[in-house]
Amino acid sequence: MGPGQPSEGPVTVLTRSTQVEDLVAKAAQEHPERPAVVSPAGALSYAELDGVAEGVANQLLALGARRGDLVALAAPRSGAMVAGALGILKAGCAYVALDPSYPSDRLAFMLDDCGAKLIVEGSADGLTPAVRSLHKPGSPEGSREDPPAAAEADVAYMIYTSGSTGWPKGVLVEHGSLANLVEWHRDVFAMDASDRCTQIASPGFDAAVWEIWPCLASGASLHIVPDDLRGDPVGLRDWLVAKGITITFLPTAVAESIIRLPWPEVGHLRYLLTGGDALIGRPPPGLGFTVVNNYGLSETTVVATSGVVAPDGEGPPSIGAPIRGVSTKVVDERLRPVEPGQVGELVIGGVAVARGYLNRPELTAERFLDGPQGRRYRTGDLVRLRPDGQFDFLGRSDDQLSVRGFRVEPGEVIAALNSHPAICASVVVGVGSGSSDRQLVAYVVASSGERPDRRELSEFLRGFLPEYLVPSKYLWLDELPLTAHGKVDRAALPAPVETVDDRPGDDRSRSRSRTPTEAALASVLSELLDVGEIGPDENFFLLGGHSMLAAQLIVRLESLFDVEISLRYLFDHPTLAEIAAGVERQMAANTAGSRTR
């Protein structure tokens, strides 16, 4: 059975032997010295990983952890993060995945919302996590008990997603759902202990769940992608080749950039998996590995549909067909099935569907449907069933957006904006043809005559929101256009044409480019960032650039100038003039090298 092909027959019932913590323990028994997690900070063998995780579990139990408790996991991508998650599962608890790079107020809300009494922490340069209690001083702690076996309906992990109320919402995923994902993945991609996989997703992004557990459950080695390569297609390609990686997941924008690069004729890579955004491009013929497009949500345990992307074909690739353990229906606004080929909302059922939202009973009842067919989830995504049984993704039925692989509820950004004393009303929309280059644009109405500039507003929002939720542009309006029903009329919003307030620097910084290289680069940047004329001293990132757009820029530079500019160089030298200087130095070095050969 190939990726994306729906299975026939009943879904396998979860048994103790299919839980990820037991599968990892089995791998540790069978080949204890084999590398389990390899990171820039060092490596953990399976025996070491299992031992560290056992230590975490023992500490949690000594501090009073009980079966089913939510335990916070706040560690960057590292061996400590993986060992911490495994230790929490070994204790019979569920881990709450937190990205420690998030603003402190956001992390504080998550900790309060989930009610975690214990937290497992780690650093990027560490392999052993630390466990501590979040009890108030003087409050009693528990005594150690042996961890009971987790049941299929117990929660395995919780992941936070953007929420329309202004705060994120936690999705509770059960062991049965996780086991289904792991077993499907191991089966269709023929995984075994010889595989070498990657971990690139943020700890707070559910793709990390997919990267970690199928790999370790197979006894394979998990390689943590260095931070400076995560958005650098050229450097990442070279790293994947050098490490002999056989299976990798890459966010859509990075995947689209990296498959356009030349690859060795013979390599180890078997599968490049992608997802999170709408895939637009197709791989060239003879790439040497298979590209698989995947679709899913946190509420459906990461992956719900999957399909191989053929090099030929018209239009964007499909999002594939349901994976094993997933059922799908395409329905109208009254939840009635539509005919094949007609557009409707995708409803997902089966073991992959999560339990619901923590502390959000009304929202859970609205999005999760319980009935004779079991639990189902209304995705809000519009699709069309093709004759071959795969789905075309056609966008959203509401205001929700996908930005660089992250799900964005504009209401969360609006709530943060409206908390600024100078703003009395706002609306946020997404601009861009594809989610990999989509930018958030905020339309704001002043509460007084004072209008903060873009830099001040962005810094204010970064105190509440992660970077991907901070708008790239701000447009001031006297008032928001409204429909006859009093709702914001998004169709009547003016086009997000740049204003002077949106651009940092003075007019001199926007003087004409000074060299042919700068002129060519300015044209590329103007197209990527969707801005007008760019001056030599203007900063790529302050103009709305981010790591995904930087990845596209790196590929453009290689194609246009035959040079390899790293993501680290772009972060350290972000102005047009500095990028052009780096390009010219490499061009000169290439010319000198060709003369000496």
Image: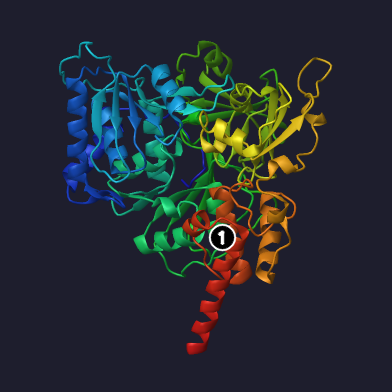
Q: Which residue is drawn at 60% across and 48% down?
A: 545
Is residue 296 placed above or below 433 in the rendered structure?
above
Q: Where is residue 70 in the image (x, y as percent from the top left)?
A: 34, 21
Q: Which residue is drawn at 24% across and 14% down?
A: 137
Q: Nearer the viewer, residue 310 or 387?
A: 310
> As drawn, is 554 to the left or to the right of 99?
right
Report the label total.
Answer: 1
> As drawn, is 295 to the left or to the right of 130?
right
Q: Mark 1 points at which residue?
A: 554
Q: Where is residue 378 in the image (x, y as percent from the top left)?
A: 59, 23
Q: Nearer the viewer, residue 356 or 475?
A: 475
Can see residue 278? Answer: yes
> As drawn, is 44 to the left or to the right of 204?
left
Q: Nearer the viewer, residue 118 or 382?
A: 118
Is residue 209 placed above or below 196 in the rendered structure?
above
Q: Nearer the viewer, residue 85 or 106?
A: 106
Q: Seen from this angle, which residue lies furthest bottom?
A: 596
Q: Position of residue 532 (x, y in %)?
A: 75, 52
Q: Where is residue 455 in the image (x, y as percent from the top left)?
A: 61, 39
Residues packed near mark 1 inside 10 Å, few (<14), some (14 to 19) or many (20 plus) = many
> As drawn, is 533 to the left or to the right of 411?
right
Q: Seen from this angle, which residue lies furthest right?
A: 484
- What colouring style does the render use? rainbow
Q: Which residue is drawn at 56% across and 47% down?
A: 546
Can see residue 371? Answer: no
Element at badge 1?
Answer: helix
- Quarter residue 501 falls in: top right
Query: Please, what is the three-letter code of the amino acid marked with disc 1?
Result: Ile
Q: Which residue is drawn at 21% across and 17% down?
A: 64
- Quarter residue 81 falls in: top left
